[in-house]
Image (spheres, rainbow, N blue to C red):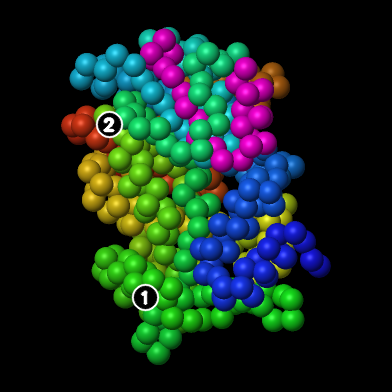
Amino acid sequence: MSSPLLDTILSRIREHGPLTVAEYMALALYHPAHGYYAAAPRRSGRGGDFFTSVDVGPLFGELIAAQLAECWGVLRRLGAARFHLVEAGASDGRLARDILDATARDFPELHDALHVTLVERSACAVEAQMGNLAEYAARVTFGRDRMPQRVTGAILANELLDALPAHRLVVRNGSLREVHITEADGALISVELRPSTQRLEDFVEWLEIAPPEGIFIEAGLAACEWIAAAAGALEQGFLLLFDYGADARTLYSQLHACGTLAAYRRHAVETEDWLATPGQVDLTAHVNLTAVRRSAEAAGLRLLGAVDQTYFLTSLGLAARLDGGASVTSVRRRLAARTLIMPGGLGSTVKAMVFGKAVGTPSLQGFASGRLTR
């Protein structure tokens, strides 16, 4: 079935030749008129295509606020007068609202010093931010389409990197090939061609892991570029990341022989038919944590901790925020906590990483366990 975005993609292929998977993802997710994220202010939750920790309720934001309060203590001791929180890929602003609600209630010293900038390219999501954060409008900058510079505070990204365009590679007869998208009789199909850029071969060599024959892998060049940009924007403070991911050795193995690129629709994964309906499904690929760490360190950041989300939340006092009451609120919070730390779900598949710049090597409570499932 034809659609405006499919017609756009077909036109580009006919004019310029096959697209890389990264180019296809950029159009399918971020086309300004017909891209998946451009067409609705919110794509997650019960009525959407996937769940994030934010959809579970305010607990996730409350515990991030607790970690940010500790970060503010570090910066304040180093002489900072204000705390600038930048959320990249902020969607409709619910996470920022949960954080601000929690700082106003539990961490007044941080709240008084806090200003929030939301980076989001979807116009309808920015409009939703203004409604969700109306009471905090005086301390929020809405709708930036790029990272601000000279940030003293923290840059936060929750499930952003897995949605950035990634190249898809495979080794055939000992040579690296790149998956491209072309057409056959008006339908999109994949073909394997020479790598579109030398950077892909350099990327694989940089990771010092030789992918086995026939294994599909994703190369997140855009994620590495984003890390470098975030590091450049951060003058002093912390980069805090939450995302699905694994180290390169795990991703480039038989465990993920088909790669991790997948489409999500109504909470079901579609690994085979991700080309069928561009702009109508979420596209994602696991984040290469090895590449993220090396990119951050190359850009002047220091890794301060990496843990499963379960350990991040429990180390920050998740249990203390629950009670045994029978009220609807109490029961909902206990159910939310279970979802956030569920093994095999958000608890173990989402990783939390924190990097620092010009802050020394503080030991942060959320990362004290050091427990990272491979």
Q: For the view shown, which residue lies furthest in the left direction? A: 360
Nearest the viewer among 47 and 225 is 225
Magenta-span inclusion, residue 280: no
Eyeballing the image, is 53 above or below 29? above
Nearest the viewer among 110 and 20 is 20
Residue 338 x %, y %: 57, 37
Query: How many other residues sit within 10 Å of disc 2, few (<14), some (14-19) or many (≥20)?
Result: some
Note whether residue 366 is visible: no
Q: Is label 1 in contact with label 2 (beta carbons under 8 Å)?
A: no
Report the quarter where the C terminus lies. Answer: bottom left
- The quarter holding residue 309 reads top left
- Relative side of 143 to 297, left or right: right
> Looking at the picture, which amino acid does disc 2 mark?
Glu
Residue 145 x %, y %: 51, 38
Report the quarter where the N terminus lies. Answer: bottom right
Residue at screen point 57% across, 73% down: 16
Nearest the viewer among 238 and 70 is 238
> Looking at the picture, which amino acid does disc 1 mark?
Pro
Q: Earlier in the sequence, mark 1 or mark 2?
A: 1
Residue at screen point 26% across, 22% down: 74
Residue carrying label 2: 235
Note whether residue 219 is visible: yes
Residue at screen point 46% across, 39% down: 146
Residue 284 x %, y %: 55, 56
Residue at screen point 50% across, 53% down: 164
Q: For the view shown, which residue lies furthest in the bottom direction? A: 173
Q: Which mark is residue 211?
A: 1
Specify the segment rendered in magenta. Answer: 110-134
Q: Main secondary structure of the magenta part?
A: helix
Q: CA distance from mark 1 to mark 2?
A: 37 Å
Magenta-span inclusion, residue 117: yes
- Relative side of 314 to 33, left or right: left
